[in-house]
Structure formats: C-alpha cells, structure tokens
Image (tube, grey):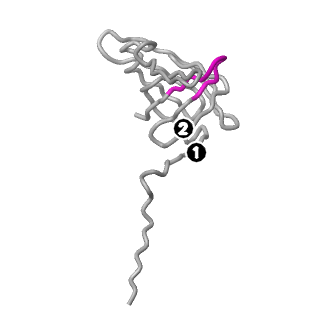
Amino acid sequence: ATVAFTSCKKSSDEATTCGVTVAAVAGNYKITKITISSLGVNQDITDDVLSVCQKNAVINLKSDKTATYTESGAGCSGTDNGTWDITSGTISGSVGTIDFVGAAIANNCTNIVVTETLLSGTQTYTLTRQ
C-alpha cells in the first residue's frame, strides 16, 4: 500500500501580500526603519534622521485620505495633519516626517515599505502597522 501526504501549509519563505489600495493600507503606523541605497551600498539612516519623538510618533493614514501625525513620549508634543493617496500602485502624501510623491509601495499586511527614487539611488521607509 502506498500512503501519500499533501500539505496546504504556506511556506514561511513565501511573502504575504495585501492590497496596495487606500482601503488595504489605511491604518496606524510607526516609522521603524529608513535606509538609503546608492551605488550598491545600503545604509540604515533611521537614527541619523529621526529623533526619539519621531520614532515614537503614530502616523494614522485614514480611509478618507486624510492623515494625522502624533508624537508620544516624555517631552514629545509634535502633531500634524495632512493627506495621502494611492494611485496606480504608488503612494503620495505629506504628514509629519513623511513626504512622498509617486513613491513605490509594498504592503505585506504587517509593514508597508515605501521606496523613493533619488538622483543617485533610493530611500526606503518601513512603516510598521500598530
């Protein structure tokens, strides 16, 4: 007798993706990483460009395409209001410490990763859903 087993379990190597639409991306986020890539060199610049208050700030991308930025922590009081949108798989918006125009976006359901093209490379922001 031959016994065969099959599995429907998703491999941990497979990337999970969620939609790149306003409805799929809307939510609360914190910027957890900023990297710059130029001439094949990747550098994490998060600590160089974000203060402690900015790292603890929550960016709320709302489904009505408005956005709020609220810092938290001792001595942190920054707030901002702005707008955002997703068109043809790219994100544009400005609120708090983010200012994107037509940047590439990927959504793995836990993080959104936004990549801006610069003159000599790219700058990538990882925003983690809260």
Q: Where is residue 62 drawn, in percent x and y?
A: 54, 31
Dots 2, 1 in contact, CB < 8 A: yes
Question: Quadrant where the N terminus lies?
Answer: bottom left
122 in the magenta segment = yes
**Amino acid at circle 1:** Gly
Residue furthest to the front = 40
**Amino acid at circle 2:** Val
Q: Where is residue 58 drawn, in percent x and y?
A: 42, 24
Q: Secondary structure at mark 2?
A: helix
Residue furthest to the top = 75
44 in the magenta segment = no
Vertical relation: 1 (above or below) 30: below
Q: Residues within 10 Å of mark 1 (few under 14, many from 20)?
A: few
Residue furthest to the bottom = 1
The residue at 37%/21% (across/down) is 56
| Residue indicated by mark 1 | 19
- Highlighted magenta segment, given as a residue range: 115-125
The residue at 48%/29% (across/down) is 126
Q: Where is residue 44 drawn, in percent x and y?
A: 45, 21
Magenta segment's dominant SS is strand
The residue at 45%/51% (across/down) is 13
| Residue indicated by mark 2 | 25
- Horizontal side of 8 relative to 93 (left or right) equals left
Q: Quadrant of residue 129?
A: top left
Residue furthest to the right = 88
The residue at 31%/16% (across/down) is 73
Vertical relation: 27 (above or below) 34: below
Q: Quadrant of residue 2?
A: bottom left
